[in-house]
Image (tube, rainbow, N blue to C red):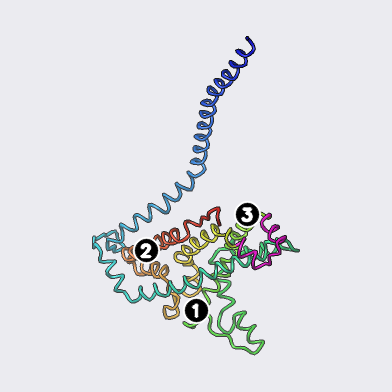
Amino acid sequence: MSTPTTSAVEPAARSGTHRVAEPRRDSAASARARRERRAAYLFMAPNLIGLTVFVAIPMLLSIVLAFFRVDGFGGYDFVGFANFERMFADPYFLSSLGRTLLYLLVLVPGLFLSGLGLALLVRHRFPLVGLFRTALFAPNVVSLVVVALIWQFLLTDDVGFIARLLDRVGLTAPSWLGDPAFALPTVMVITIWFSMGYYMLIFLAGLQDIPREYYEVASIDGAGPWTTFRNITWPLLKPTSFFILLTSTIAVMTGGLDLLVVLTGGGPANSTTLVIYYVYQQAFVYGEFGYAAAISSFLVVILLAWSALLFALTKGGRFSHAQ
């Protein structure tokens, strides 16, 4: 009779032990989660402080400044929406905005396709692949001012390296930076050349994150390169593609000022005066800081709207398990 009693007690004791241990494990897990959160906040703190001090606060001050007329000598006059009304009635601003949209429509797809194509090219191992990757990324470690000076030397009319090279084969080089028909396309080509290595590197990281087993199964099933790319590579690159579309749009809209200043100075005939250059011109050439702040605020609104639209259309670059 004692044996059944003992055997009946033991499971109860064991179950009681489990009931005591479970809260301890939960407490340890929650303590570990708190430590991990604290560590995450400490790691993020430098970036958050930098973004707050150098991005968020200046952005807010710029929005406030857009409602003032600044004379450059410490005088601030509140003018309400006058700067914004002037902006939408300014033909030079509207032409620079149209030029920027054209610049955007060419550069974003150009950077996307060139970065993806180069990443697909250098993802495989072949002799000197490391050298190719380094050479393609190398322009990104050089100052953009230096890059602009080098290209200015190469593209100088008549005496530039490219003009002399074309002259040797019996061709006459156009005025790459002096002709309004060629100036903006030339800046676009230089920008793509300079930036494609950076986007190649991001795409390469996304490609290397795709499990090799997927490609092995596709190869066993007899899938060709295009089928493999369409059904495996492209869907699994969706988060990377979203990131590149977002960052390249912001970079194209707000970057490249030093390249424009050194190469063309906004000319010839304002053919390379993009919105970012127009902001610089109004603020630091004409001293219209309030007007420049209004244009900058409008540019921020455009970028926020584009980011929200991109998030809505792609769900933040996420994909479901069904995909």
* Residue at image coords 55%, 63%: 143
| Magenta-colored stretch includes residue 228 | yes
Mark sitting earlier along the chain (2/1): 1
Q: Residue at image x 56%, y 20%? A: 17
Q: Residue furthest top?
A: 2
**Residue occupied by mark 1:** 183
Q: Please state which of residues 163 and 202 is positioned toward the viewer in this rendering.
A: 202
Point out residue 234 in the picture as x, y percentages from the top left corner: 59, 62
Q: Amino acid at mark 3?
A: Asp
Q: Which residue is mark 2?
A: 296
- Say few, some or many: other residues with alpha carbon within 10 Å of mark 3 (under 14 / 14 to 19 / 20 or more): few
Quadrant location, the C terminus: bottom right
> Label 3 vs label 1: CA separation?
40 Å
Q: Quadrant of residue 296?
A: bottom left
Q: Position of residue 311 (x, y in %)?
A: 45, 58
Question: Alpha-carbon distance for marks 2 and 1?
Answer: 24 Å
Q: Where are the magenta residues, as a range?
A: 213-233
Of residues 156 and 116, which is closer to you in this image? 116
Q: Which residue is mark 3?
A: 209
Is the magenta region chiefly helix, strand or loop?
Answer: helix
Query: Which quadrant holds the N terminus?
Result: top right
